[in-house]
Image (tube, rainbow, N blue to C red):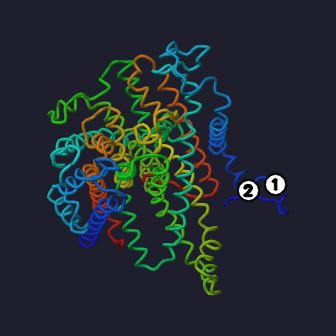
Amino acid sequence: MTAGTAPLVPRRRFLPVWFRDVLARPSGAIGLAIIVIHLAIALLAPLIVPYDSAAQDSKAMFADPSWQHWLGGDHLGRDVLTRTLMGGREAILVSTMATAVAVLWGGLFGIFLAFAGRFVDEAAMRMVDAMLAIPWILFVMLFVAGLGTGIGVLIPILGISYGLSIVRVVRAAALDVVTRDFIQAARARGERRSVVIVHEMLPNVLDTLAVQAAMTWSWMLLGFSSLSFLGFGATPPTPDWGLMIADARSAMMVSPWPALAPMVALSSLIIGINLLSDGLAKALGVDRMTKSAV
Amino acid sequence: MVRLVIQRILSSIVTLALLTVFVFFAVELLPGDTCTAYLGRDAKGDRLETCRENMGLNRPAVERFADWASGAVVGDFGVSPYRNKPVSEIVGWRMRNTVVLALSASLFGIPLAILFGIIAGIRRDKPVDMALSSISILAMTVPEFVSATLLILIFSISLGWTSGVVTAPADAPILVLLGSTILPTVALALVFAAHILRMVRSSVIDIMESEYVAMARLKGLPFYWILWRHVLPNSLLPAINVIGLTVAWLLGGVVVVESVFNFPGLGRLSVDAVADRDLPLTQCIVLILATGYIGTNLLTDLASLVLNPRLRTFRG
């Protein structure tokens, strides 16, 4: 961690150093602000929206923005503003939980592999490489074809699939740590492997893991929305950005608003998360360039 | 050198074999099988039995895997229960179309990305660089279905320059297909071109600060000669690696982009197959696209081995 020039007797502060470091960077501060606004909207949406998200009003069908409907109406005469404000709830919920699954299993398994014998490590990494060769969307779709869709299927599958790249990154970081003296010392003390992993390894790969978590969250959001767009994510009466864009696409000639509003909402949240992970990576001194592609 | 190449090829084959195992047994381990997916979870009785009999599902899994994998090698992926046709027949033309789309996106996107990456690199922090960098970051972060839909909204609906959906049938001649493939090509190229652009930009910045470029400048060589002789070749090497990595994105992006534009390729077919719960077809498409990924990665690795002598001494 980069603490800058700290005074000799550090004052106690409310926020940890790394967090203030994130906030001190424009990307971190702007990103966090966007995310907080989105989370607040998602939590408060049911209280503040002007209409019922499923209410159909034939007069508002393809309506242009007006004082009654600030962002117009969609093909069924539903209020676009209401649906856009509500549309992030399921996506944020699923992407957050799936990210937690991915970070948990990817992080622990990655650390475990750094410890495991050469044979186990080699075999597991071969398998991970083979699974990473499948584009993530097809990986998820393979399971959706077998199991059907729904939150209960998507959260674990998205978590497993995105966890694969976390396994790689964390294993690489853990391999760096595992040869250090304090790990040798802990093993020589006869600590159990689980204790070494949780108390000695985890704190040392936490920086890498935090940056990975932020990046994974943005991919996860993109992933779930793409699945919704294709018809495998959120189910129709639910207002969801991906689904709304898919629905509004065929009528864009009549009215672009029902497509534009969720596009702006979804893109702004993804950009916000990306900005935050950029700020986080710089604040923690983790290089994210090498892991950008898969 | 030869040993390295052989090693690299062998490891690709191992990955490919593991991939085949995974694609088959992932489906095998799920509750239900091809027939319950096709007939519905609660199907029982004669229809289910007949379907299982026809699909040969009553044999042991290992035996079926051997059949499936050895068939896959010669391009026989079994029969789709939903479409009642051999999978290879359904896939045929669409695979060609996806190859056409991916190739035209690469041929259009990669040179432009390298060109703009070099421009951004030598004009670092100038307005041109700021504009190019912001556009590429936007292209990288905004979901493909959003940028593709925006392209339709702007170029097809507002400006009316080209049609927003592909109407050519799957077996249309390539030229007819290409005529209506402009927007899908741009949509697909955007994301991975943005990655390559960023990579080229940062390596150009490194190279411009290097001692050999400083030396070339001191010798009084013309700027464009330095670019051509020193900067371009050295910035291409990292670009080749990124190309290999972003192909994964391209192959995944194919699914979304083809769906947006109704392009008759493998990606859209996979969406249909999943919607129909057509497992043999889905498995086949997953295998084809993942093989494409492994193959491209092998090619780019070998290309950088050939082009970059420094890598040849490394082991593994």
Image x and y of residue A175, in percent = 51, 72
Image x and y of residue A261, in percent = 52, 27
Disc 1 residue type (three-letter): Arg
Q: CA distance from mark 2 to mark 1?
A: 8 Å
Sort mark 1 into few (<14), some (14-19) or many (20+) by Cα contacts within 10 Å.
few
Which quadrant would the N terminus of chain A be assigned to in this image? bottom right
Disc 2 residue type (three-letter): Val
Q: Are the two marked residues, 2 and 1, in contact with CB atoms closer than 8 angstroms?
A: yes
Sort mark 2 into few (<14), some (14-19) or many (20+) by Cα contacts within 10 Å.
some
Element type where label 2 sits in the image: helix
Q: Is residue A201 left or right of residue B52?
A: right
Q: Is residue B230 visible?
A: no
Q: Is residue B84 visible?
A: yes
Image x and y of residue A18, in percent = 70, 55
Query: Which residue is found at the position 40% from the left and 38% from the top?
Result: A231
Q: Which mark is residue A17?
A: 2
